[in-house]
Image: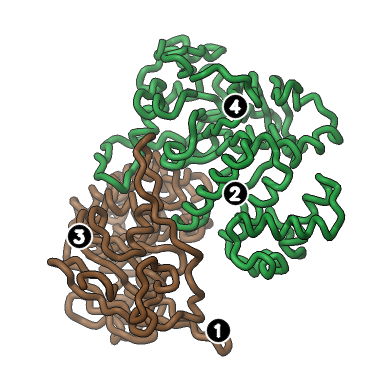
């Protein structure tokens, strides 16, 4: 999949040839720093943003080929939870209206059944159904995010893209939201794509993880494998940068030199080569392919496994 | 912990803000101290009062806020009793602060080199040229590549990480005795965050300043600080050496907070309970503000006054049930 944005004479390559699969019931983490293309990837899957090129197969059919009407019908199966509930919840809608909207659009339930579904969903996300008549400004941050989750799950989707759902939350609320997402997945059998820069949240929630850098996947694999044996220098630096909440326990920190290059002006070859401690002449010329090193552990690096 | 003369000692500080017709006590009888060359973490979730505490130290409270009581002792003087001109001499020269809103702390219409040079001109009385040379030198020391060229840039032409380096340069330009960093890496990517923390630690070591680090990130506290002060709803809950706090948290709030930590280096158990500690914080209680959510609450917790229990040498819990 490719997504580029034009800005005058410049082209920004937000997502630059990304290929991956997600299997039913999985939780896949998509991690990376700001601007690496993780949110754009998710938006392209749901066609909230139209991809420039590429296909998205969902249950075997290509979503990018669907007419707007066919896509709308599919949306009950593909939902998204957004990072900031303050901008993703309509401030003039009560919780009831926010939650009823997707059910009404898809003609799923009505009347007494609708009311029951609303109440049941509220209880599912650990909220008192009494909150149905409140407006977003009457809710706490954690409650607003739970409404965002409730709206996504109310149509009983098969796939939910979670875009940094815990990033703006306090620590004690974050862990609760993660616990909630785990339970909902178990109850409803959903598949998650969890987008986050918070690697500790990824470790708690995901079974597999993909690391993005400047629009490309640089490493992917089972969570345990990637967190314990990262092979790409970028993944290593990213993991080592996170402080461990245990005094005296020090890990060797790999400090990266400089900052990522501009997305308008990507370097030739491996996009990471300017910051890589192990750069070789080949890295400056050729784009490293994403190769399977060891039973599902994929790395895009010329030097690994050589 | 060795007995050291405190550089900064906050005693029984209370600050109120207006809310409709009444005044809300946002900082409630806060006391803690910071020794020479010490790094102390001030931690808490949203609304715990950690930022307001630091703004009070700097004399940066908005006009609607009112200090209701207490003292802030710094080098033998109570900062709350200083006149504005005296306070202005303390700020920058003796106490300097960096803020979480990186971009808004810089003047968007002024080249960053000139902004740093202004500090040298105003605080050290250097000439324009000397000040500018010093500014370029310090920007270089802050790890800004090609500092001479970057000094001519405007803030919007630099990344947020670079802007924070400029602000750290301005903070240390006058070699203040106390540095206050309020969530200095909010909104920065983790690899850049690690760079900035290394820089702040280097600067603290090199200048021998004390550092008050305000953060919600317990990982940063564990790696950076010697002591930690835990705040909740405007009150200090616990204060202890870092090792002691993480190994033996005494206050029920701290215990809950530590249980909500997620880690990259291992899988943690996700608690079943709805542990949203900072939601619906109550500022109206006269006693302990955590009493509403506390699993070990006792009758005296609702009454006026917070007990101070020394559970270990230098490890204090402000709690009735910890005695």
Question: Which residue position is annotated with label 1?
Answer: A7
Q: Colour of chain B?
A: green
Image quadrant occupied by the N terminus of chain A: bottom left
CA distance separating discs 2 and 1: 30 Å
Closest to the observer, A26 or B188: B188
Relative image position of residue B77 (x, y in whole percent): 76, 22
Question: Which residue position is annotated with label 4?
Answer: B34
- Circle 4 Cα neighbour tier, 10 Å, few/some/many (<14 / 14–19 / ≥20): many
In the rendering, which numbered label is found on residue B100? 2
Which chain is assigned brown? A
Please report contact status of discs 2 and 1: CB closer than 8 Å, yes or no.
no
- Horizontally, residue A54 falls left or right of residue A296, namely right
- Image mark 4: chain: B
Relative image position of residue B39 (x, y in whole percent): 54, 33
For label 4, the SS is strand
For label 3, the SS is strand
């Amino acid at each position: 999949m490719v997504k580029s944005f034009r800005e005058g004479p410049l082209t920004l390559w937000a997502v630059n040839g990304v290929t991956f699969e997600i299997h039913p019931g999985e939780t896949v983490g998509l991690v990376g720093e700001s601007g690496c293309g993780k949110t754009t990837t998710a938006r392209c899957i749901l066609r909230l943003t139209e991809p420039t090129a590429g296909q998205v197969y969902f249950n075997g059919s290509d979503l990018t080929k669907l007419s707007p009407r066919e896509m709308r019908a599919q949306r009950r199966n593909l939902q998204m939870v957004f990072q900031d509930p303050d901008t993703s919840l309509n401030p003039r809608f009560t919780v009831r209206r926010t939650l009823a909207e997707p059910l009404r659009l898809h003609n799923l339930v009505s009347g007494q059944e609708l009311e029951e579904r609303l109440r049941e969903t509220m209880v599912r996300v650990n909220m008192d159904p009494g909150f149905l008549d409140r407006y977003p400004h009457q809710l706490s941050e954690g409650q607003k995010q739970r409404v965002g989750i409730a709206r996504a799950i109310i149509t009983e989707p098969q796939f939910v893209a979670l875009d940094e759902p815990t990033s703006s939350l306090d620590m004690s609320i974050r862990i609760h939201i993660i616990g909630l997402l785990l339970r909902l997945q178990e109850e409803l059998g959903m598949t998650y794509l969890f987008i986050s820069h918070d690697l500790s949240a990824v470790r708690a929630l995901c079974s597999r993880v993909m690391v993005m850098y400047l629009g490309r996947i640089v490493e992917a694999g089972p969570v345990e494998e990637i967190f314990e044996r990262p092979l790409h220098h970028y993944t290593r630096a990213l993991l080592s940068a996170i402080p461990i909440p245990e005094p005296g326990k020090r890990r060797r920190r790999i400090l990266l030199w400089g900052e990522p290059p501009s997305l308008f002006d990507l370097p030739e070859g491996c996009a990471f080569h300017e910051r890589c401690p192990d750069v070789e002449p080949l890295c400056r010329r050729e784009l490293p392919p994403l190769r399977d090193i060891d039973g599902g552990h994929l790395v895009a690096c010329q030097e690994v496994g050589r | 912990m060795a007995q050291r003369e405190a550089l900064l000692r906050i005693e029984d500080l209370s600050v109120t803000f207006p809310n409709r017709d009444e005044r809300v006590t946002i900082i409630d009888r806060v006391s803690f101290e910071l020794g020479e060359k010490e790094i102390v973490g001030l931690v808490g979730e949203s609304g715990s009062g950690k930022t307001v505490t630091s703004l009070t130290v700097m004399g940066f409270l908005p006009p609607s806020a009112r200090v209701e009581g207490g003292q802030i002792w710094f080098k033998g003087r109570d900062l709350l009793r200083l006149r504005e001109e005296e306070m202005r001499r303390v700020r920058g020269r003796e106490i300097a602060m960096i803020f979480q809103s990186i971009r808004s702390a810089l003047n968007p219409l002024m080249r960053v080199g000139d902004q740093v040079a202004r500090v040298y001109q105003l605080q050290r009385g250097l000439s324009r040229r000397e000040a500018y040379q010093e500014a370029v030198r310090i920007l270089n020391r802050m790890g800004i590549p090609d500092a001479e060229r970057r000094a001519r840039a405007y803030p919007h032409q630099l990344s947020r990480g670079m802007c924070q380096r400029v602000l750290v340069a301005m903070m240390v330009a006058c070699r203040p005795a106390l540095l206050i960093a309020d969530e200095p890496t909010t909104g920065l990517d983790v690899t850049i965050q690690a760079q900035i923390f290394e820089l702040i630690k280097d600067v603290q070591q090199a200048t021998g300043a004390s550092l008050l680090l305000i953060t919600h990130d317990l990982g940063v506290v564990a790696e950076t600080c010697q002591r930690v002060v835990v705040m909740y709803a405007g009150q200090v809950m616990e204060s202890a050496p870092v090792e002691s706090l993480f190994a033996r948290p005494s206050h029920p709030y701290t215990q809950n907070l530590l249980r909500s930590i997620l880690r990259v280096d291992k899988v943690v158990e996700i608690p079943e309970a709805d542990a949203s500690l900072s939601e619906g914080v109550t500022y109206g209680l006269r006693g302990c503000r955590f009493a509403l959510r506390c699993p070990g609450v006792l009758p005296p917790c609702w009454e006026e006054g917070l007990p101070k229990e020394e559970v270990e040498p230098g490890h204090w819990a402000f709690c009735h049930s910890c005695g």
